[in-house]
Image (cartoon, rainbow, N blue to C red):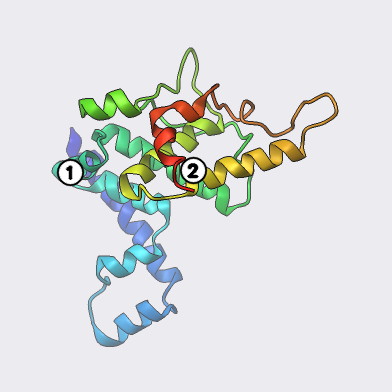
Amino acid sequence: LKTPKIIFAHDILMDDINEVLRRNERTICIKSFRNKYSDKYPPYWIISQLMTFGTISKLYAALPPEDKKQIARNLGLNVELMEKSLQTLAYVRNVCAHYARLWDNANSVPPVNIKFNRVEYNSKYNFTFHTERVNTTFFPIFYLITLFLINTYPQSKWCNLVANKIREYQEKTTNEEDNALISFSKMGFPENWERLPLFEEMLRNQ
């Protein structure tokens, strides 16, 4: 039953890669490769520079099960959560690339609840996004990106940069009745969100 799904994902992936190469035939790396080699496809280190985030998401979905498990394990996630998280990040990338609003957008691909395989991760970083309904605010996305960063680049200042930008516009858009057009609460941030273990750690990076 799993074989058709893997073949289907691989077909979609190859279509995307072929389209990426077609659009980038004039780039230096592709032109250099074509001049030196007769292979149809460049090595992955070249292709990966040209891939969209959506294609990377499809690439992960097409990998053999053991490879997917190994990659997910590095982030303390299982394969299902990893796949869905990459889909969410691909959606976020597309929203930003097209200059659409993310902060008050009812996100159509919200992150799933995070539950880790490793006990020490689960007790420290687990956070339930959903209550009675799917949470489509910005906060679950903010949490998810921060979570990936703490595992891939724990020195990142991204978390602080975003929080400071929200504070800036919260102050700018506050009216005389003390109502703000842009605010942490309107973006789905819970009270005392800075005290969640994930943010306590990442907000130290100034």
The N terminus is located in which quarter?
A: top left
Quarter of the rendering containing residue 74? top left
Residue type at mark 2?
Answer: Cys
Q: Secondary structure at mark 2?
A: helix
Decide: few, some or many residues near mark 2? Use Cα within 10 Å; few <14, some 14-19, many ≥20.
many
Work out whether 29 lies above or below 10. below
The label number, if any, that marks residue 122 in the structure image: none
Report the number of numbered marks: 2
Residue at the image position 31 percent from the left and 58 percent from the top: 14
Residue at the image position 35 percent from the left and 61 percent from the top: 17
Quarter of the rendering containing residue 176? top right
> What residue did someone put label 1 on?
70
The residue mark sitting in front, 1 or 2, is: 2
> What residue did someone put label 2 on?
159
The picture places residue 51, in percent across and down from the top left corner, at 39, 60
Quarter of the rendering containing residue 190? top right
